[in-house]
Amino acid sequence: MKFLHKNVSETQIRLKDRLWLYIFSYIVLFLLIVPSLVVIPMSFSASQYLEFPPKEWSLRWYENYFFSWKVENGFNDWMQATWTSVKVAVLTIFVAVPVGTMAAYGLVNGNSRISKMLFPIFISPMMVPSILVAIGLFYFFVQLKLVGSVLGLVLGHSLVAMPLVLIIVFSALKNYDMNQEKVARSLGATRFRAFREITLPQIKFSLVSSALIAFLTSFDEVIISLFVAGGDNSTITRSMFLALRDQIDPTIAAISTILIIISSGLLIIMQVTGAKENKR
Amino acid sequence: MTNSSLNISIKNVTKTYDQFHALKDISLEINSGEFMTLLGPSGSGKTTLLMVLAGFTNPDYGSVKFGEEEVILKPPHLRGIGMVFQNYALFPHMSVEQNVGYPQKLRGVSVTETKRSVEEALETVKLAGLGHRGVDELSGGQRQRVALARAIVFKPKILLMDEPLSALDKKLREEMQIELRQLHDTLNMTTVYVTHDQKEALTMSDRITVINDGELMQLGTPNEIYEYPSNNFIADFIGESSLLPVIVRNGVVHFDGAEIKLSTSPKTDGEFFLVVRPEKVFITIENSDDVNKFEGVLLDSIFQGESQLLVVKLKSMSEDEVVLRVRVPNGSVTQAVLPSAGQQLIIGLRVADSYLVS
Amino acid sequence: MSGIIAEKLNEQGLQRVASKERLTFFGLTLPYLLIVVALIIIPVGWLFYLSFIGRDGSFSFENYERMTKSRAYIRIFITTFKISILTTLICAVIGYPLSYFMSQLSRKWANICMIGVLIPFWTSLLVRTYAWLVLLQKKGLLNNIAIDIGLISEPIKFVHNTTGTLIGMVHIMLPFLILPLYANMRSIDRDCLKAASSLGATPTRAFWTVFFPLSVPGLLAGLLIVFVLCLGFYVTPAILGGGRVIMAAMKISSNIELYFSWGAASALGVVLLIVTSVILFIASKLVSMDQLGNRSAK
């Protein structure tokens, strides 16, 4: 057991003195990842009840999800809700990314005192408790007749996605050498052209990841959707939440499995593109 | 490559940030085809002035003319200047060729003409044949050359450089100084060069503008600035020197009670400093009328390769210690008979080399 | 000379250029600012106003008075703080060693472990909450295993109570603590520890006198962000608490959904906002805002 005597830190601690830390850490990492995965076998269970491990296997919950209009408890038309969620999430990208990027550029290059003042205001959607944002929006949208509309959802979700875009693009621009834009301008480019031809290609991975995050934020958003969505425009998270609160429907396991696949996929895309950007 | 260049005329340029005066009423003429260095310690305002010339900093008021044309209100991209930044700021997503060709692309120059001018520019900076390389495959010195090629490819009449050599190691920096100067002589464009390195300024410039605290302190050739600094700041900042506090009464200079002879007697009374450059003082024994003499004790003797530096504490009645440095060239006669630490010695400074600053 | 200065060459033109520049940058931030003002500042301001409107429609403090008198509200405040503090502490106890462990690994292995932290971060909150519901319920995995190996004879009730809420919340909040803390620990200069041991500190002593104090800013950032997020948390306690654990956010929601009582909901929201703001203000004085900038609360 020679490896137990290997040094594992600057301060000459040997592995055997640290063994508890290794074991503890791996257990915690295990507990962070694995519990979510339990929904995957659940989703293939044939039983109505939540049994684990399932005694029989079937695809009925996936069937239920994809063809939910056949189901009697009419209020959760899963496909409709999914479609709304996708629509809203994609539109959220198109609002949050340009608006957030423009603001980040303005904050990085503008008067630093004004930027310092604006920054807390700009990340306030992250700081104000979501429930408060949700009921505030609800109240506001009732007046504007935006409750239950796609526009209302897009605005609400953009609000929470924008600070994330802002922070990602802001830090990308902070790490970026603005002198490059200056050089381009001294060489004859207008500010806009310098941004488009010099800056943009170099921060594009940050823009891609901020777009993915905006998508995911909107897609996973629960509370604002609970209040603002409604009627024909329920979102998938809203329908899931209502279903979870009222009864335990294994269809949710099937949807959860699909959601896990989507978010892991996006995470992998982001790690890969991020690694590419770091290499440069 | 080009022989047209423009003079630059700067008038009353003033810039204030809140309470901080970055530039105080700077007026300055830069001749056509001149290599002008803006020299000053960091935070002195020299880079701010360069940025005013480039159009990236708006002064509060003032005028900048390129030739006869007022450019102060023009945005940077219409000023037609070539510029090299401190960290080169090459575009990492473009090859060397694309970097150098970028200004031509912006100007709508045809592909064949761009190709030709890029090759020419790369040849000028001795990088011919490296056009296909990526920027990250280049060494520091090569990057520097690419940045330079990019700034001269469109034959600007004015070239601005912001501490372009500061990131290079000493040896390469000294090579590049000479090369840049030669390049300037071939291209003959008006060059404004910012640096905090006084030796670099002395090596390269036609004239030097010394800036401190946003003020223009002195403008002159390297020789003038070195030999006749206009105040103690410049005397201290340019080259090595010891400043001896002296008092002038009735046109006579006194240091610690003794009289100091000058080639021309000062016109005003008051407190001044005698500028003592280490290479201009020497150990002496003889009595001569054209040499000012100082008695002192040798504190330390430091071997520095090409010379030996002696640190001498002057005999003084006042409480303040006054220390002189004396440089003895390696291989000189004096070096063979150097005194040892603690010994008394007499230091001489020729009257012709004795110069006062305020 | 002074005569020329008085002229102030091109002053007006330069001012025009400068204000045009300022306008450009301000214009770029304008759409963002408009959205935030329209969708946060105005609605929240409106709620603030509503919180001072009594049942009869006139100005009154009754919504706030009710909070100090009603037992139900006091219980909600106690529950909210109890759950938030417990979650934060448990996260610290679990998250600190894990962050430390990751900070000692090589970059490559730390990044692999980081995926372990990020996957739950990116998995939908609802999915994770649902998964815990499946695991912890009476006929869930945990009880089944415990009964199979003979640990217990009767299933234990893990969900629809405080225990379940805490388990779910810790799982969801842990990444928020680990990310700033790990970033901080990574940035600690390892030479400090070498210096400490070269000066004769034992490893334990070097840790407590050098490493730990240097990691405090990251720990504080993590603790505060977790605590603030817990205070306003809604989804997980609503599902795993099964209606028995009522936190402030849930009361706000039920005030509106069930009783249409905007005044009461707004007042509670205002209190929540003030507590949150005070904590975040203290946090911003203690640690840089960047470290708080992680994924938003849900």
Image: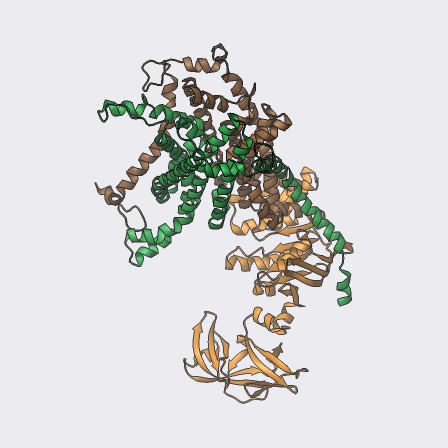
Chain colours: A brown, B orange, C green
Q: Position of residue B317 (x, y in %)?
A: 50, 86
Which residue is rendered at x = 70% and y = 42% of the image? B107
**Left or right: where does residue B290 sit relative to residue B308?**
right
* Quarter of the rendering containing residue C175: top left
Answer with left or right where residue C207 lies relative to residue A254. Answer: left
- The x and y percentages for residue C68 are 47, 39
B329 shown above or below A110: below
The answer to whether residue B184 is visible is no
In the image: residue C9, left or right of residue A177: right
The part of the image, by quadrant, that contains residue C181 is top left
**Residue C283 at x, y = what percent?**
47, 47
* Residue at the extreme front of the image, as rendered: C56
Residue C24 point in image, percent of width and height: 67, 43
Left or right for C216, reference C51 = left
The foreground one among C238 and A23 is C238
Rendered view: A53 above or below B262: above
C46 to B312, vertically: above or below: above
Q: Is residue C198 visible from the viewing direction of this image? A: yes
**The one of C33 and B187 positioned closer to us in this rendering:** C33
Residue in the foreground of this view, choosing between A169 and A190: A169
Figure label count: 0
Q: Quadrant of the N terminus of chain C?
A: bottom right
Say which of B93 and A88 sits in front: A88
